Amino acid sequence: MKRFIIAFITLMMITMVSCGQKKTVDSSGSGLGSTFTCDMVLLYEDSEYCGKINRTDTRSWEIEFSSPETLAGVKLSFVNDDVTASYKGLDFTVPKKALPVKSVLSNFITVVDEISSQEKMQCVEKDGELVVEGQIDQGEYELVINEKNGTISSFEMKNTNVVIEFENVITGSSNVSVSQTSQTTVAESTVIETTVQ
């Protein structure tokens, strides 16, 4: 019995250390509610895609690739549900090599646009970052936001082996309003999911 109690206390201490604090965050006050530009590194299966993301408005995005060489200079424009491709000012259909990446980026854009349109979002605080978990038709996602300045850090969809990392994020608005309405210590796995349809 004594060993069981010691093991239980040890397990509880480990859980407390690895836990985050559940928060309700003002979506519109975070960087998600603003226009922004940033550098991205997209890892999909065994390939790496680099480029720049420019969110010009809600449901209006531009992504220009710098690598790999086969896509360097190609720009994808996402406006509402339409996607167009261009290269040095010439418009054309999305190239086959970019189709899987287009789908990945569409998922990311859907998540950010939907979360930013909500008044509040549920997340878990962990190591100075806010982790938002949810699900779309294509699977579960995890969006990580820098708690200090409200900018995006990474996006992941584990079922499709997709990870996007973001750097040099410049937002159109520097006002960040993060309001902690509940501060209960919970395990990361118990985060309330934001459902995106």
Image (cartoon, rainbow, N blue to C red):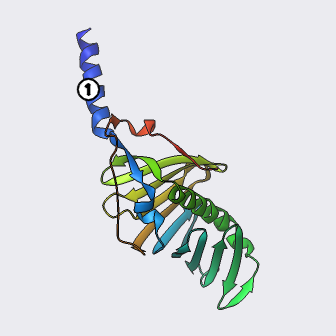
Q: Is residue 100 left or right of residue 192?
A: right
- At x 37%, y 45%, the residue is 23
Q: Is residue 113 left or right of residue 11?
A: right
- At x 60%, y 68%, the residue is 59
Residue located beneath label 1 in the image: 10
Q: Is residue 92 left or right of residue 5?
A: right
Residue 45 shows in the view? no
Residue 191 picture location, percent across and down: 44, 40
Residue nearest the viewer, comparing 53 with 162: 53
- At x 48%, y 73%, the residue is 35
Above/below status of 50 relative to 6: below
Residue nearest the viewer, comparing 56 with 128: 56
Residue nearest the viewer, comparing 182 with 92: 182
Number of marks in picture: 1
Q: Is residue 21 left or right of residue 54?
A: left
- At x 54%, y 46%, the residue is 134
Residue 113 shows in the view? yes
Q: Quadrant of residue 124?
A: top left
Q: Residue furthest top?
A: 1
| Residue type, mark 1 in image | Thr
Quadrant the N terminus occupies:
top left
Q: Quadrant of residue 148?
A: bottom left
Residue nearest the viewer, comparing 16 with 81: 81
Residue 170 picture location, percent across and down: 40, 75
Residue 99 picture location, percent across and down: 71, 68
Q: Residue furthest front?
A: 119
Q: Which secondary structure, mark 1?
A: helix
Query: Circle 1: is it few (<14), some (14-19), or many (20+) Cα within 10 Å?
Result: few
Residue 68 picture location, percent across and down: 58, 77
Above/below status of 192 relative to 71: above
